[in-house]
Amino acid sequence: MVTLTHDTQVAGRLRGGLGFAVLSASSFGLSGPLGRGLMDAGWSSAAAVAVRVLLAAAVLAPVAVVQLRGRWGLLRRTAPLVLAYGLVAVAGCQLAYFNAVAHMEVGVALLVEYTAPVAVVGWLWLRQGQRPTRLTVLGGALGVVGLLLVLDVVSGARVSAVGVLWALGAMVGAAAYFVLNAREADGLPGTVLAAGGLLVGGVVLLLAGAVGLVPFAVSTAPVPFDGFHVPWWPPVLALGVVTAALAYVAGIAATRRLGSRLASFVALTEVVMALVFAWLLLGEAPGPVQLAGGAFILVGVVAVKLGEPR
């Protein structure tokens, strides 16, 4: 009976983790097309990211205060974690990604960024001695093949050296995002980590713009998408609430249930969702090869799960 109860709890945790991971990936996948629209309307990448994360921090702050329930000492003890999360996983990762999108297609930027699961596997092996199993390696290889097919980079997609460098910076930030999300032992609630990290990241970007380290420009011009325009505020609101507040909280919940390795591979579904949103908003329609690539990604995720240590 005890074993059955434990197995039920493990299965429930897995289902919940996968649900949160897909929700997070879908929410994050919307950010690139929305960000491209804002930048085409005159926004700089730094301004788009800063407004996005600060709005998300404002949305999450009341929930974070309730979760802390006066335990401000916990926040002080985990301040280095929150700062690292804000500087690397939020500000660094998102600014690098939006700059990459400004120089290349959304899909190609995501291909480079989402080599992050490989970096996570390497980190866990070197730092914690978690040697990847053969199934994990196979799943990683299938995921890479799926990415290549989904993004169809061999068909003449525009690749920029500057964009690739920015995308590599986003990859480092994404790997840090998964590793830091998994630190449940610190006792810091996920919403508090997300709210604090988003606030730190937003403030850093505002300061960088104020001193001229990065271009910082906003615009109230209509935002162009494929065949239509919308006022500036709906994309900004969606960036903050959906692609940041919801995405980060769901991502932390997923990683704490699945672990950083499996969560990072499930997050590859963001690439598929980004292409769907890019099709709807930017007119970049996926083809049969890309759909086949999505199937490879899903099979790769299953292989990684089966290869997880017992």
Image: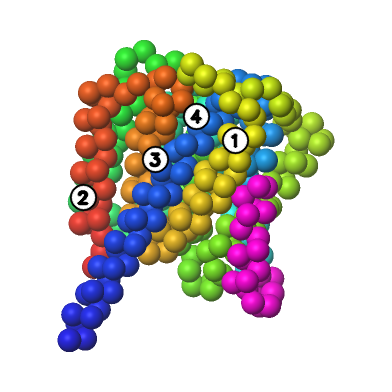
Check disc 4 and report the residue beneath it: 33
Establish if 2 lies above or below 101: below
Sequence-wise, the earlier of marks 3 and 4 is: 4
Residue on which disc 3 sits: 270
Residue at the limit of the structure toward the right, as seen here: 211
> Can residue 115 be seen here?
no
Q: Foreground: 301 or 38?
A: 38
- Disc 3 to disc 4, how far (Cα)? 12 Å
Amino acid of disc 1 = Pro
Q: Mark 1 points at which residue?
A: 234
Mark 4 or mark 1, earlier in chain: 4
**Predominant secondary structure, magenta span:** helix
Q: Give the distance between the C-alpha atoms of the residues marked 2 and 3, in whole angstroms.
A: 18 Å
Please, what is the three-letter code of the amino acid marked with disc 4?
A: Pro
User: Is residue 220 something one can see in this rendering?
Assistant: yes
Check whether the beta carbons of the residues at disc 1 and disc 2 lie within 8 A of each other. Answer: no
Q: Does the magenta stretch include residue 68?
A: yes
Position of the N terminus by quadrant: bottom left
The amino acid at mark 3 is: Glu
Marks 3/1: CA–CA distance: 21 Å
